Image (cartoon, rainbow, N blue to C red):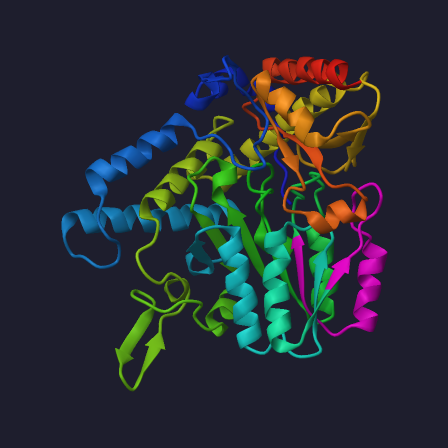
Amino acid sequence: MESGDGRGAEVNWAAIRQDFPALATLARGKPLAYLDNAATSQKPAAVIERMRRYWVEENANVHRGVHYRSQLATAAYEGTRVKVQRFLNANSVNEIVFTKGCTEAINLVAHGLAAKGIIRSGSSVLVSTLEHHSNIVPWQLVAERVGAHVLPIPVSDAGELDLDAYRAMFQSAEVAVVAVGHVSNALGTINPVKEIARVAQEQGALVVVDGAQAGPHIAIDVQDLGADFYTLSCHKMYAPTGVGVLYGKLALLNSLPPYQGGGDMIRTVSFDGSTFADSPARFEAGTPNIAGVVGLGETIDYLTCLAGGPVDSRESLVEAMAAVAKREDELYNRTRAEIADIPGINVYGDVPHKASVLSFTTDWAHPHDIGTVLDSHGVAVRTGHHCCQPLMTRYAIAATVRASLSFYNDEADISAFGKAMHVAREMFK
């Protein structure tokens, strides 16, 4: 993972907050304190306006027309692919596939690897206990179909993967794939993906990284990480919903069979058979979410310039994400301090290397009850198992309260959260 020089102090975060119209609205008659960013993020005005401009000035199908608007739409769509290549530091634009989200991207890879026989009878897929269901269930589906096994990588009491146990798993199983999240959506733990990938690839296994929660928080360098496949869930990183990214090493992508058939993914079609395009077209059958992809491109521009650097610079992006990480670390520490004096709070995943996710239970109320009280004060958090039931089982709990922060949150949001938590404590004690 790259690091910039951390110009966080030079960013006017109060001004940045004004870029997000939703943050000026009310919830239950109170100023909105939006602390559910791990579920989805709010969108900057520039992205909203860019999508409006697409619908008005450029709306047409891509890759299919010689007319003016189709050329505009295609240029905007493919322009985003170039921006994503830079965002991930991929080798080629052809390694960037647009999907509906991480879920579809992981399913695409899982089914493709099973169809190729890489995941086969008797082989194993190692999946971390921290994973979201979208990085568990797809592997279970293909494993059941071909007679493979899905084995959990243990997690410590603190919320970190047990790397010694992980290394030992290669001695007792024929490991075909290791699937791991870069950042845990339930705890915020940042996993040591580079080391995980090194160990796996030394043993001949492929590595699939769920980057849904990494995209909003840290600079990602897929070449440095060494992952064979990497996914993004773009609505969590200030882009529209319904857009995701699959990165894959080009030779691997071109070796996989198509996931869906239809228009735009073929070379030739006849009733004797069809031949297929190379990546990325091979995996982008049908009319895509063009407006969403265009919005993603504007989002990457916005993030790249956050610390004042040029829009087309990888170095500018790395510097901006360093500023984001510094800002969010400060916000997390303040949020943690807001509830430090409330008795009976149990924090999960309080580890050194983590994103701005505060996940906790209390001894005096169910998470859903706490979430309801917070909502009545305009504070939006997530309560539940966070689509991580195996992780909840590991800790013998049913649910947590999760406050997940973004760089656009401020001290007023944190104060509202703290005050509402003290009210909840008084109500339920």
Quadrant of the frame with the N terminus: top right
- Does the segment drawn in magenta span residue 177? yes
- Residue 239 pos. (x, y %): 44, 38
Q: Residue at x 70, y 31 (%)?
A: 367
* Horizontal side of residue 309 vs 3, given as left or right: left
**Is residue 357 at all visible to an observer of this figure?**
no
Q: Residue at x 54, y 32 (%)?
A: 320
**Magenta extent:** 151-180
Up-down relation of residue 404 to residue 210 (above or below): above
**Is residue 91 at all visible to an observer of this figure?**
yes
The answer to which quarter of the image holds residue 6 is top right
- Residue 261 pos. (x, y %): 36, 69
- Does the segment drawn in magenta span residue 387? no
- Residue 146 pos. (x, y %): 62, 77
Up-down relation of residue 241 to residue 114 (above or below): above
Up-down relation of residue 15 to residue 203 (above or below): above
* Horizontal side of residue 386 vs 263, given as left or right: right
Q: Residue at x 52, y 36 (%)?
A: 40
Which one is nearer the viewer's eye here, 300 or 57? Answer: 57
The answer to which quarter of the image holds residue 92 is bottom left
Which one is nearer the viewer's eye here, 426 or 212? Answer: 426
Quadrant of the frame with the C terminus: top right
